[in-house]
């Protein structure tokens, strides 16, 4: 069914470099030639270690930062270089839920005012009564009482605040919702509730998600397809279950090996795949494959030449010189 849906988001050869203060001509390679797409009604999981560039990709998509190069297409429209004024109607289509629910809400205004902000920013022309009804509906969607509208953020728990952040994102009825580590700061039991709620929204409203996380076990349950990032590069992309059954890239194998197992024998059997070494600096990324400094299979070609994405079959894309030989 997903294969027949049209592409809602297309990211093509995205690069995001940041200049280093006080060091002329030096740049942090936060995102380096990343390409992927998300179909309507799909959840695309983007995973990787902290600092790999996941959040930078998200911020570029919503144009909180201007990409260095590449293209971002939303609903077929190139939004890469649109002005802030031209981006206003686009922001109705794509909304973002951030990691920290404590810093995402303005503590000086009520929940009603917080929920009304997107409608005011979009200049919808709605009356106060209409905005109030929309706010009530948004709170009901996230299983919170409309009595909370007159309260302030400090009166709520972390899980309740994140629900309010999700309600705010839904106020303008977006097509794409970007969840940037949106559940990582919550208790495990609350995480499950929020994930189930997001799944319900997808069924009811046809929402499309970019779900960014470092918890591979959680991503497996919420995503249709998964992309694995390392040091600003996309290393592997495929169907969610396929990446767990048959990971091809050594980095993906290492990430999966780091997920805790309840069975001690199974954990011991996969110890050889656990990642070793340190992630190189994005200020001075290694030549060739970015993972070659930690890869147990690295050869001379890996140290000299950056591999391209290749289809290993069935749309399973992998960025590795040696993946076909090992698979």
Image (cartoon, rainbow, N blue to C red):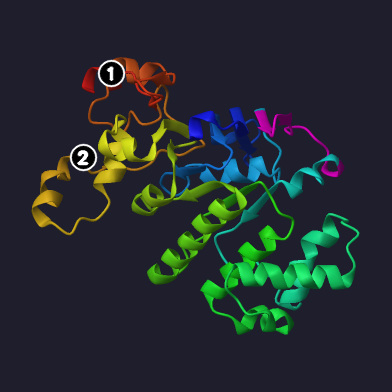
Camera-side residue of 112 and 249: 112
From the top left corner, tell me how far across and down residue 157 is, in percent. Answer: 54, 79
Q: Position of residue 150 (x, y in %)?
A: 74, 83
**Residue 285 placement, left or right of 72:** left
**Which numbered marker is on residue 36?**
none
Question: Where is the C terminus found, in terms of image quarters?
Answer: top left
* Residue at (46% x, 32% y) in the render: 234
Residue 80: say if magenta. yes
Question: Is residue 310 visible to us here?
Answer: yes
What's the residue at 33%, 28% (across, down)?
292
Identify the mark at residue 273; answer none if there is no mark.
Answer: 2
- Residue at the disc numbered 1: 324
Indicate the position of residue 309 as horizontal and vertical percent values: 43, 21
Is 241 on the left-hand or right-hand side of 95? left
Percent across and percent down for residue 218 are 38, 54
Q: Which element carries disc 2, helix, strand or loop?
A: helix
Q: Which residues are magenta?
A: 71-85
Which residue occupies the extreme left position in the image? Answer: 265
User: Is residue 249 located in the magenta-colored stretch of the structure?
Assistant: no
């Amino acid at each position: 069914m997903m294969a027949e849906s049209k592409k809602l988001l297309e990211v093509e050869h995205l690069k995001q470099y940041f200049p280093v203060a006080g060091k002329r001509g030096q740049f942090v390679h936060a995102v380096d030639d990343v390409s992927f797409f998300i179909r309507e009604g799909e959840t695309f999981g983007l995973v990787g270690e902290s600092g790999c560039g996941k959040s930078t990709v998200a911020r570029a998509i919503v144009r909180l930062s201007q990409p260095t190069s590449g293209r971002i297409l939303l609903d077929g429209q190139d939004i890469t270089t649109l002005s802030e004024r031209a981006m206003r109607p686009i922001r109705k289509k794509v909304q973002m839920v951030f990691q920290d629910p404590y810093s995402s809400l303005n503590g000086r205004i009520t929940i009603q005012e917080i929920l009304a902000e997107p409608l005011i920013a979009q200049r919808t022309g709605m009356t106060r009564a209409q905005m109030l009804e929309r706010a009530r509906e948004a709170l009901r969607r996230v299983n919170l009482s409309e009595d909370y509208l007159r309260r302030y953020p400090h009166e709520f728990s972390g899980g309740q605040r994140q629900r309010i952040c999700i309600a705010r994102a839904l106020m303008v009825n977006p097509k794409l919702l970007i969840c940037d580590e949106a559940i990582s700061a919550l208790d495990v039991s609350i995480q499950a509730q929020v994930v189930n709620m997001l799944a319900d929204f997808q069924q009811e409203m046809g929402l499309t998600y970019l779900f960014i996380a470092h918890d591979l076990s959680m991503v497996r349950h919420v995503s249709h397809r998964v992309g694995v990032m390392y040091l600003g590069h996309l290393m592997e992309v495929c169907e969610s279950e396929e990446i767990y059954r048959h990971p091809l890239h050594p980095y993906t194998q290492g990430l999966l090996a780091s997920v805790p197992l309840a069975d001690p024998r199974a954990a011991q059997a996969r110890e050889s795949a656990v990642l070793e070494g340190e992630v190189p600096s994005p200020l001075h990324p290694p030549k060739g494959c970015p993972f070659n400094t930690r890869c147990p299979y690295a050869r001379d070609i890996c140290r000299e030449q950056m591999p391209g994405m290749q289809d290993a079959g069935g749309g399973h894309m992998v960025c590795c010189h040696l993946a076909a030989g090992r698979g």
